[in-house]
């Protein structure tokens, strides 16, 4: 069953409003830190395991040159390392260093503490329900985006 146009428009508005709120919170919480929001995003995805730089750029939705600059900065700070992909000498693999893993852990702890503070009037049930809804929304959007990129459709 398709969403009504007004419902879809309302959801789009809420998503963009949430993005703005998250961006404001993130920006306020990175002031004075050695890694900005973009670099923290790269660290988070590299923290999921060693990855090809091209896959990482795709996952982050950035161009290869933009990602290369981010990786170079993180490498200079000692948070990531690059090496040639043994399966394809033209490709690079990116991984966290021990220092990078520690930095990521610290960032995630800080984000958790900030969110706990901002949502102190929420119950566990509220948070769990919101997390489930956001997960469902994210998975639906990813599935639809992959289908569109592959030239297929997810609607009947």
Image (cartoon, rainbow, N blue to C red):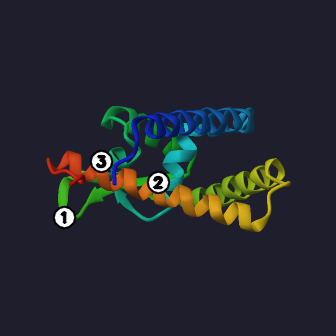
**What is the crowding at mark 1: few (fewer than 14 residues within 10 Å), some, or many (at least 20)?**
few
Query: Residue 127: x and y, percent?
Result: 70, 61
| Front one among 21 and 13 | 13
Query: Residue 138: x and y, percent?
Result: 45, 54
Kindly identify which numbered label has been placed on residue 87.
1
Using residue 48 as the reference point, say whether residue 150 is left or right of it: left
**What is the crowding at mark 2: few (fewer than 14 residues within 10 Å), some, or many (at least 20)?**
few
Mark 2 lies on residue: 137
**What is the crowding at mark 3: few (fewer than 14 residues within 10 Å), some, or many (at least 20)?**
some
Mark 2 or mark 1: which is in front? 2
* Structural distance between the alpha carbons of marks 2 and 3: 12 Å
Image point 53% across, 46% down: which residue? 41
| Front one among 39 and 129 | 129
Using residue 37 as the reference point, say whether residue 122 is left or right of it: right
CB of mark 2 within 8 Å of CB of mark 3? Answer: no
Mark 3 lies on residue: 145
Which element is circle 3 on?
A: helix
Disc with the residue nearer the chain's start (2 vs 3): 2
* Structural distance between the alpha carbons of marks 3 and 1: 28 Å
Query: Residue 4: x and y, percent?
Result: 40, 41
Using residue 100 as the reference point, say whether residue 106 is left or right of it: right
Image point 44% across, 65% down: which residue? 49
Disc with the residue nearer the chain's start (3 vs 1): 1
Labels in figure, total: 3
């Amino acid at each position: 069953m398709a969403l009504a146009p007004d419902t879809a428009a309302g959801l789009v508005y809420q998503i963009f409003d949430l993005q703005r709120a998250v961006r404001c919170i993130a920006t306020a919480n990175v002031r004075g830190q050695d890694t900005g929001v973009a670099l923290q995003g790269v660290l988070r995805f590299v923290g999921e395991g060693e990855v090809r730089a091209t896959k990482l750029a795709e996952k982050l939705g950035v161009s290869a040159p933009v990602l290369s600059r981010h990786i170079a900065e993180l490498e200079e700070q000692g948070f990531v390392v690059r090496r040639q992909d043994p399966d394809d000498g033209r490709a690079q693999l990116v991984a966290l260093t021990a220092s990078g893993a520690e930095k990521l852990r610290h960032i995630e702890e800080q984000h958790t503490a900030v969110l706990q503070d901002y949502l102190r009037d929420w119950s566990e049930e509220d948070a769990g329900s919101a997390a489930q809804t956001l997960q469902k929304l994210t998975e639906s959007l990813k599935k639809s985006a992959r289908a569109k990129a592959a030239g297929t459709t997810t609607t009947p």
